[in-house]
Amino acid sequence: MAAEWKKAFSSLPEDVQEQIREKQRQAQAKKKAKKSEDKSGPRPVLEEDRTPQRTHLAMEDYFGACRAGVFQQEGFMASEEMVEHLLRMDFNQVVGRFRDGSPVRLSSFNYFLFDGTDKQIWDPIFLARLAYEGFFTITTGGRSRERIPLPELQPYYGVLDWKNFNQAKPVKKALKRVKSEEGCPGCKYYLYCNRNLKLTYQGLNQYHKDQNGENWMTWKYLEAFKAASDNPKINFRLHSIELYDGPLPEAGTSSAVPNLVAGEIGYGIGKIYTS
């Protein structure tokens, strides 16, 4: 019977075979999620937000969603026009084959490496347009060669509203620990935005180099996005989020400058912020 089923499956069109494989992968993912829920118990649903949402994503699910990886093609120039052209394309079209013979679709890629001169690939308007269209740009290269932009259309996105952030157990535990004697007795922390971008970058850069040996967010990357942010005609704003162990002194005063203890750099488009 198994041999007969295998023969019948192989006689199906390749597109139909891939649809069946995709359903099997989804069924396996659901089975894994169900096992995980059985062990830890179901997550309570908030009364004010009962819309279905996925809160956990395994690494194999994320990277398995776009098996082809990087899309690169000669003439795929860095420009707003090419971004528009790409997004008008049918992402279900077959553009190649995997080694197992299954079709490679445009949706099989999550990274899109644009071609062009240094000026073109680092053009602030181009990078801001990518961000506006949903790409999250990191960089690739390093060590042996200079890093270049690597835009990604992520297979999964998450949205966190402030009300859910404030109610999250990890946040509540962290705040409780900070206020306790075990954290820093007597400490008061102050959160600021866009006070010292360079200092925040230096801290992040050192942290990533200590942890990973390098930092994909180069100063050149930051300068390009800052140029986009400084342009009032572009719907893009760079933000430096900074946490200090004391209040920043008023301009012109000689008060002691507090320590920057944490921070991040992200950007906003309209009312949406990401980092």
Image (cartoon, grey):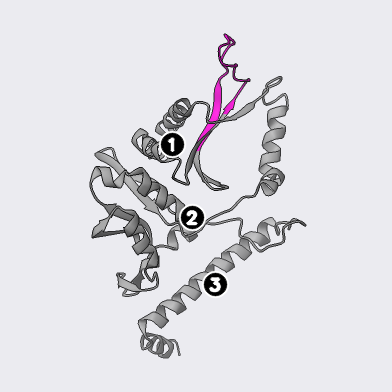
Q: Which amino acid does label 3 sit on?
A: Ala
Magenta segment boundaries in residue numbering? 243-265
Asked where in the image residue 243 lies, by quadrant, the reply is: top right
Q: Where is residue 246 in the image (x, y as percent from the top left)?
A: 63, 20
Q: How many marks?
A: 3
**In the image, what residue type sits under mark 2?**
Met
Tell which of 210 and 46 is nearer to you.
46
Judge depth for marks 2 and 1 and give the one in front. Answer: 1
Along the polypeptide, which appears first: circle 3 or circle 2?
3
The residue that appears at 47% across and 44% down in the rendered structure is 236
Measured from the top left, where is residue 40 in percent x and y?
Answer: 68, 56
Residue plotted at (40% across, 54% down): 152
78 sits left or right of 46 in the view: left
Query: How far is the residue under mark 3 from the one under mark 2?
Result: 17 Å
Q: Answer whether residue 245 is magenta in the image.
A: yes
Q: Kindly identify which residue carries mark 3.
A: 27
Q: Residue 59 carries which label?
A: 2
Gap in Å between the C-alphas at discs 1 and 3? 47 Å
Q: Does the magenta stretch include residue 22?
A: no
Q: Is the magenta stretch mostly helix, strand or loop?
A: loop
Tell me, for residue 230, which label it has, or none: 1
* Amino acid type for the residue under numbered disc 1: Asp
Q: Where is residue 190 in the image (x, y as percent from the top left)?
A: 64, 26
Instruction: Say which residue appears at 41% left-offset and 62% top-offset.
Output: 66
Per the model, the C-alpha gap separating discs 2 and 1 is 36 Å
For the residues labelled 1 and 3, say whether their Cβ atoms are less than 8 Å apart. no
Q: Quick one: 215 or 29, which is closer to the camera?
A: 215
In the displayed structure, 11 sits above or below 96; it is: below
Element at badge 1? Answer: helix
* Disc 2 element: helix
